[in-house]
Each structure stands twice: as structure tokens, then as C-alpha cells.
Amino acid sequence: SKDVEHRTSKYRKNVIAADHGALKRAIRPARGFQRMTTASATINGFEVMRMIRRGHYILQQPGTAGEVRRVSQRFGLAA
């Protein structure tokens, strides 16, 4: 697709691999799920928290309250 930019240099691929490796290290202790829904929700939660920490979300409230609200919205929970 024309909208997708592929990384062809070796250096740029390392950025993606390092990010994926960090996620795998975070998820490793949580392996052994018995249901796909549990695994999906857990990985989704890891991703949301990583995105918040990196500033990819603009939180309506600063601090922990904003993070809790964003995670609750993402998972359809009442906060």
C-alpha cells in the first residue's frame, strides 16, 4: 500500500526489534493463559500502559487518575 512506509535499513529495523523485545520481556512472566480472551486482554493492557507512558495518548486528567480513566475506557469498564 502507498500509505505504509517500510523500514529497509538495518538500523531502523533494530528500533522495531528492540521495542518488540521489551514487550516480550514484560509478557513472559504472564504466559500460560488457558483462554484466548484472558491472553488478549492482558496483552492489550500491556500495550495501553506502554502507550500512556510514551505519551501516545493525551490524557484528559493528569497523573494516575487519567491513566485509570483511559484504561477503563479501553476495556469498557465503569470508572
Image (spheres, rainbow, N blue to C red):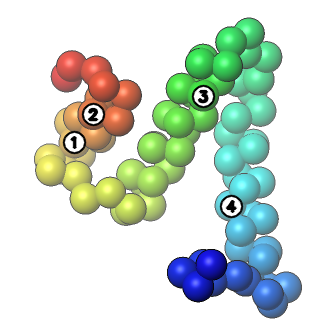
Disc 3 residue crowd, few under 14, some 14–19, many 20+, Cα 10 Å: few
- Callout 3 amino acid: Ser
Residue position marked by numbered label 2 in the rendering = 73
- Callout 1 amino acid: Gly
Residue position marked by numbered label 3 in the rendering = 40
Q: Residue at x 70, y 35 (%)?
A: 27
Q: Earlier in the sequence, mark 3 or mark 2?
A: 3
Quadrant of residue 2 within the rendered picture: bottom right
Marks 4, 2: nearer the viewer: 2
In the image, taking residue 51 as reference, residue 3 lies left or right, namely right
Q: Residue at x 53, y 36 (%)?
A: 44
In the image, taking residue 75 as reference, residue 65 lies left or right, namely left
Disc 4 residue crowd, few under 14, some 14–19, many 20+, Cα 10 Å: few
Q: Residue at x 68, y 47 (%)?
A: 23
Residue position marked by numbered label 4 in the rendering = 19
Q: Quadrant of the C terminus?
A: top left
Residue position marked by numbered label 1 in the rendering = 66
Question: Whole-percent x and y of residue 22?
Answer: 70, 52
Do tag 4 and tag 3 residues touch (Cβ < 8 Å)?
A: no
Give the Cα distance between marks 1 and 3: 23 Å
Secondary structure at numbered mark 3: helix
Marks 1, 2: nearer the viewer: 2
Secondary structure at numbered mark 1: helix
Q: Earlier in the sequence, mark 1 or mark 2?
A: 1
Q: Residue furthest left?
A: 61
Question: Against 57, is 41 above or below?
Answer: above
- Callout 2 amino acid: Gln
Q: Quadrant of the N terminus?
A: bottom right
Secondary structure at numbered mark 2: helix
